[in-house]
Image (cartoon, rainbow, N blue to C red):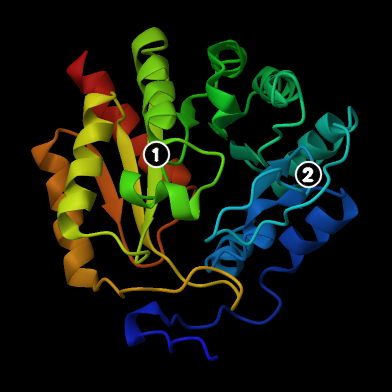
C-alpha cells in the first residue's frame, strides 16, 4: 500500500541548510520534547529556522491512540519536576518571548498532569514570558482545567480535531461534547483568556459538517479556530479521504467571519502555527472592542 502523493500546494521550499541548528541543538541539550517532532508536524523545519518550537510536557507517551496522530502511544513515565528548569532554560536560550506549551494526554494521572502543567506556566509568567497552553480534555475534569486557567496563560487552546460523527472511529477516549463544554467553560469563567481550537480536514468530513463545527465553536465562545489539511504521518494511520484546496480553505476562513470569530485555514495550518501572530491580531481586536 502506498501513500497518496501530496498535491502541489502542500509542497514547500526547503529552508537554507543549517538554519534550524540552534533550535535543534537547544532542544537536544536541554532534553526537552516538542510536539513539532513527536507529531511529525510539516512546519517543524520552518519554525525551527525561526528559533521557535512548541514544547511537549509530561513525557513522549500518550495514553490515548487517535487514528490521525503520530505521537507515540504507550506506558507513560512519571512527571519529572526538573522539566520546569529544562523548559525555562530552553526558552531563554532561544530568546523566546511567546511560548506555546502542550502535553500528551495523561489519563493515568489523577489530575491528568494539570498541576505539573500549571506550575510550568506560572514559572514562565514569573520570568516575563507570555504563554499559550494547548491542553488535553482532562477527562472533562473542570478542576484540572481551572488549575491551568488560573496559572494565567494568555491563550488557552484545546483541539476539537475533527467533526462529531468521526469521533468514535478516530478519537477513542475523547468526546466531542466534552471538548465543547471544556471550551465553553473557559470562555465563560475566564473571559480575559483567549480561547482557541483546531481541527484537521481530509478525514472524511463534509463541508456542512465543517461549517457546523465552526458554528459550535463560536457558540462555545472560542475566539480563534485553526483548520489544516490532514496528512497521513505513516501507513498505519487513517487514510486521507480528500485534499481540500487552498481556495476551499479560504472559504472556510470566510465562514468564520459569519460566526464572528477568526478562522485561520490553510493546508499546512496546525494548532500552534503562527501562534504569536494570531494572538496579537485577536488581542489587538479585543482591546479595541473594550
Location of residue 205 (image quadrant): bottom left
Q: Nearer the viewer, mark 2 or mark 1?
A: 1
User: Residue 132: percent from the left, percent from the top?
Assistant: 53, 33
Q: In the picture provided, is 225 more to the left or to the right than 72?
A: left
- Please, is residue 149 above or below residue 256 in the view? above
Instruction: Pick the quarter of the image with the C terminus.
Output: top left
Mark 2 vs mark 1: which is more N-terminal? 2
Residue indicated by mark 2 = 90
Inspect this view and state whether residue 99 appears.
yes
Q: Residue furthest left?
A: 258
What secondary structure is found at the residue carrying circle 1? strand
User: Residue 256: percent from the left, percent from the top?
Assistant: 18, 43
Residue indicated by mark 1 = 197
Inspect this view and state whether residue 163 appears.
no
Instruction: Pick the quarter of the image with the N terminus.
Output: bottom right
Neighbour class for label 2 at 10 Å: few (<14), some, many (≥20)? Answer: many
- Please, is residue 71 above or below residue 213 in the view? below
Residue ID at (40%, 45%): 198
User: Residue 69: percent from the left, percent from the top?
Assistant: 57, 58
Between residue 246 and residue 280, name the one nearer to us: 246
Q: In the picture provided, is 62 more to the left or to the right than 207?
A: right
- Please, is residue 207 above or below residue 46 in the view? above
Q: In the picture provided, is 50 more to the left or to the right than 79?
A: left
Inter-mark Cα distance, 2 to 1: 26 Å
Q: In the picture provided, is 201 more to the left or to the right than 161?
A: left
Q: Which mark is residue 97?
A: none
Residue ID at (67%, 56%): 71
Residue ID at (71%, 34%): 106
User: Residue 136: percent from the left, percent from the top?
Assistant: 57, 34
Neighbour class for label 1 at 10 Å: few (<14), some, many (≥20)? Answer: many
Residue ID at (73%, 53%): 73
Amino acid at each position: 500500500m502506498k501513500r497518496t502523493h501530496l498535491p502541489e500546494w502542500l509542497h514547500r521550499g526547503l529552508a537554507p541548510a543549517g538554519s534550524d541548528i540552534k533550535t535543534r541543538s537547544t532542544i537536544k541539550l536541554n532534553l526537552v520534547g516538542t510536539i513539532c517532532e513527536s507529531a511529525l508536524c510539516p512546519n517543524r523545519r520552518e519554525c525551527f529556522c525561526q528559533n521557535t518550537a512548541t514544547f511537549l510536557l509530561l513525557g513522549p507517551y500518550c495514553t490515548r491512540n487517535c487514528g490521525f496522530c503520530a505521537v507515540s502511544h504507550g506506558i507513560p513515565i512519571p512527571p519529572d519536576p526538573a522539566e520546569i528548569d529544562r523548559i525555562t532554560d530552553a526558552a531563554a536560550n532561544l530568546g523566546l518571548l511567546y511560548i506555546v506549551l502542550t502535553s500528551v494526554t495523561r489519563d493515568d494521572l489523577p489530575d491528568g498532569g494539570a498541576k505539573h502543567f500549571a506550575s510550568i506556566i506560572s514559572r514562565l509568567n514569573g520570568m516575563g514570558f507570555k504563554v499559550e497552553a494547548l491542553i488535553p480534555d482532562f477527562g472533562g475534569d473542570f478542576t484540572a482545567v481551572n488549575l491551568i486557567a488560573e496559572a494565567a496563560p494568555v491563550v488557552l487552546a484545546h483541539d476539537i480535531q475533527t467533526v462529531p460523527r468521526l469521533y468514535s472511529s478516530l478519537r477513542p477516549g475523547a468526546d466531542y461534547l466534552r471538548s465543547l463544554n471544556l471550551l465553553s467553560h473557559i470562555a465563560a469563567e475566564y473571559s480575559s483568556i483567549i480561547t482557541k481550537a483546531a481541527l484537521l480536514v481530509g478525514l472524511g468530513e463534509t463541508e456542512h459538517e465543517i461549517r457546523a463545527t465552526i458554528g459550535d465553536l463560536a457558540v462555545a465562545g472560542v475566539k480563534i479556530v485553526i483548520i489544516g489539511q490532514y496528512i497521513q504521518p505513516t501507513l498505519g494511520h487513517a487514510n486521507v479521504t480528500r485534499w481540500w484546496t487552498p481556495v476551499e480553505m479560504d472559504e472556510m476562513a470566510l465562514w468564520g467571519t459569519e460566526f464572528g470569530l477568526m478562522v485561520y485555514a490553510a493546508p499546512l495550518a496546525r494548532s500552534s502555527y503562527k501562534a504569536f501572530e494570531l494572538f496579537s491580531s485577536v488581542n489587538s481586536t479585543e482591546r479595541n472592542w473594550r
